[in-house]
Amino acid sequence: MNVIKTYLSAVAIVTFAGNGFTQTTVRTDKVSHAEPLYFDLVRDLGARKGEKEFNAGFDFSNFRHYNKNAFLVEYEFAPINRLGFEVEADFSFFKRAAQNAEIPDNKLECLRFSTQYSFFISTRLKTTLAVGYTQLVEFTDFRHFGKNNLVTGTAYNPFFIAAKRWGENFHTLIYASPLLEHDFATNKLAVNWQINSSFLYTIPHTKHFIGVELNKEINNGKFEITIRPQVKIKLSKKMAIGLITGIPINKKNESYNSFLRIIYEP
């Protein structure tokens, strides 16, 4: 819980400090990038003060012995130019697909507290670079609420982002980060890697895009990749939806999955 208190205190300080600046009167540089839908960013690259967004996501995954239905809600905002914050809650629910198969318990997987800063923005090069950090707080399953420790672990996740727009409609982005997972029960620290890339095409004169996202992981020395074709449809000035299909390439127990993201920008 100390992690949550520390993060919220930092957000409050930055937000309060940001209100003391007249950034709302200054239009800072910002390159328009199409950003991936499954592994989305904390806030738009080059975020401007006052921007905010609500997301809800629905993930349907098939495994060998069970099906997993996941749900997420998130809120992201920019208290000052170039700096974004995000709070996200991830829930997972499981259904047995094979008789007598063992399945995980339903749970609040984690709370994610993230911040991201765009330190380089070039409208001439159509390029943005950013760094950020995510703190994950992991919880016990619902069945053991009140019986076991509520918080079972945490994860430390610094990351780097590089994005470039090629011409007016083609977009590439790379996200790279170590993920340091701390299990409180064993007091062990596991280090894995995430390297995500996306190739997206915006349809001319619209906010719609199509493309593919490649989610690459190195877990316990094993390389895994999931290909995610996707499309974003802008329904109105404030509302959009994202449709994603997941195709695992070398994950033995995982089959295809689908993901729906609902995006609202007030």
Image: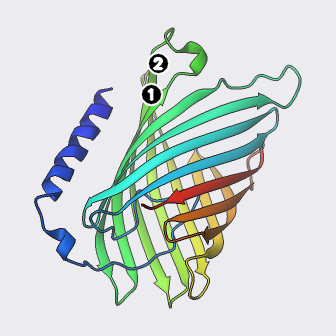
**Dot 1, crowdedness within 10 Å: few (<14), some or many (≥20)?**
many
What residue sits 53% from the left and 76% below the top? Answer: 172
Is the residue under label 1 in contact with that under label 2 (CB below 8 Å)?
Answer: yes
The reply to whether residue 182 is visible in this rendering is no
Indicate whether 240 appears above or below 180: below
* In this rendering, position of residue 217 left or right of residue 245: left
Q: Which percent across, then down, holds residue 174?
A: 49, 67
Nearer to me, 2 or 265: 265
What residue type is disc 1 on?
Answer: Gly
What residue sits 25% from the left and 35% below the top? Answer: 6
What residue type is disc 2 on?
Answer: Ala
Secondary structure category for the residue under label 1: strand
**Residue marked by disc 2:** 185
Secondary structure category for the residue under label 2: loop
Residue 153 is labelled as 1
**Dot 2, crowdedness within 10 Å: few (<14), some or many (≥20)?**
few
The total number of labels drawn is: 2
Q: Nearer the viewer, mark 2 or mark 1?
A: 1
What residue sits 77% from the left and 22% below the top? Answer: 102
